[in-house]
Amino acid sequence: MSFLLDTCVISELVRPVPDEGVVRWIEARNEFDLFLSVLTLGEIQKGISKLSAGKKKSKLKVWLEEELAVRFAERVLPVTDDIALMWGSMLGRSEKNGQTLSVIDALIAATASVHNLALVTRNISDFNGCSIDIVDPWSIS
């Protein structure tokens, strides 16, 4: 099985003290079965942009632009026409059922669906009604 890593998962890896369960889960996977959405890069850049100038901001910028770019070189998935159509279907179903999905979360879920990937996230409730497989490495012992 292959996996789409949500922003919270990839960000966990650069925390000063990352969750051991998340680190173990990632290390137990074949690197080439792990994917990112291009939107995750944007979310990380957004977080970096909100930081004041300093060591932490510089370190995260290098991590995003050099380390992450190299690690996931061919495994950053763009938003395609198929993903946009799936996104529209997911949002439509969600609204019809009285649920709300954020635009970014719905696009990430659509990416997982189109590429037949399980989404790895801590934020399970953000993806209610998306009909995708979800793995929460924080809850695995």
Image (cartoon, helix red, strand yellow):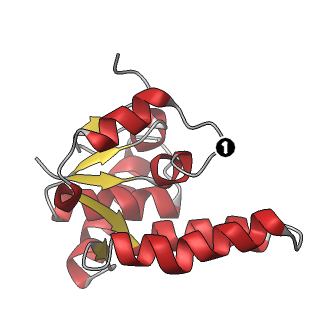
Tell me if residue 53 comes above or below residue 113 in the rendering. Answer: below
Residue 85 appears at what percent x and percent y?
Answer: 26, 73
* Rendered residue at 49%/63% (across/down): 104
Q: Rate crowding at label 1 as few (under 14), some (14 to 19) or many (20 or more) other CA atoms within 10 Å.
A: few
| Residue 94 image position (x, y, % from top left) | 39, 48
In this view of the protein, which residue sits in the foreground, 38 or 68? 68
Against 55, residue 29 (above or below) is above
The answer to whether one can see residue 51 in this image is yes
Residue shown at 35%/33% (left/top)? 24
* Quadrant containing the C terminus in the rendered view: top left
Residue 111, image x and y in percent?
28, 64
Extreme residue toward the left, this view: 1
In the displayed structure image, the side of residue 4 where residue 127 appears, left or right? right
The residue indicated by pointer 1 is 16
Q: Nearer the viewer, residue 114 or 94?
A: 114
Residue 89 seen: no
Kindly give the residue lying farthest to the bottom in the view shown: 81
* Residue 12 vs residue 93, the one in the foreground: 12
- Specify the amino acid type for callout 1: Pro
Q: Is residue 21 above or below residue 36?
A: above
Q: Give the structural element (helix, strand or loop) at label 1.
A: loop
Q: x%, y% of residue 20?
A: 47, 29
Q: How many marks?
A: 1
Q: Nearer the viewer, residue 55 or 85?
A: 55
In the visual, does 95 lie left or right of 115? right
Q: Residue at x 55, y 72 (%)?
A: 64
- The residue shown at (32%, 43%) is 26
Q: For this view, does 83 lie left or right of residue 127?
A: left
